[in-house]
Image (cartoon, rainbow, N blue to C red):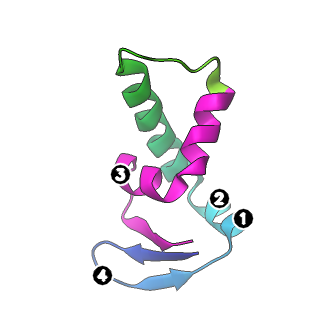
Amino acid sequence: MIIVNRHTRKKRQMEYADFRKEFAKDIKNAFDSFRHTELAKPFYNYKDDNSMEFNFYFQLQWNFNNHGNSAWYIESM
C-alpha cells in the first residue's frame, strides 16, 4: 500500500500488517468516527459490531481517509 503525508506529500510504501501496527491509533479513531456516523443514521441495521467492523475494513481506503484525522492518507492499496 502507498500512503502519503498530507503536509509534506512524502510517499511511503508499506505492507498492510505494518500499516496496522504503525497506525493503530489512527485506525481506531477513524473506526470510532465511522461507527458514530453509521449509528446516527435512521436506518441502522447492523446486527453487531463485527458487521460494522467488516464494512469499515471492506472500504478501508475511503473510510480511513475520510473518517480519520491522520496526517497520512492511503493513496492506493
Q: What is the spatial separation of the Cα atoms under label 3 and label 4, in whole angstroms?
A: 19 Å
Q: Residues within 10 Å of mark 2 (few under 14, many from 20)?
A: few
Q: List the residue tagged with mark 4.
A: 8
Left or right, 26 with reference to 51: left
Q: What is the spatial separation of the Cα atoms under label 4 and label 2, in whole angstroms?
A: 22 Å
Amino acid carrying mark 4 in the image: Thr
Q: What is the spatial separation of the Cα atoms under label 4 and label 1, in whole angstroms?
A: 24 Å
Question: CB of mark 2 within 8 Å of CB of mark 1?
Answer: yes
Amino acid carrying mark 2 in the image: Arg
Question: Does the magenta run of residues contain 6?
Answer: no
The numbered mark, 4 or 2, whose residue comes first in the sequence reads 4
Question: CB of mark 3 within 8 Å of CB of mark 1?
Answer: no
- The secondary structure type at the circle numbered 1 is helix
- The secondary structure type at the circle numbered 2 is helix
- The secondary structure type at the circle numbered 3 is helix
The numbered mark, 3 or 4, whose residue comes first in the sequence reads 4
| Residue at image point 60% right, 48% down | 57
Q: Chief secondary structure of the magenta span?
A: helix
Q: List the residue tagged with mark 3.
A: 66
Which span is picked out in magenta? 50-77
Above or below 36: residue 77: below
Q: What is the spatial separation of the Cα atoms under label 2 and label 1, in whole angstroms?
A: 5 Å
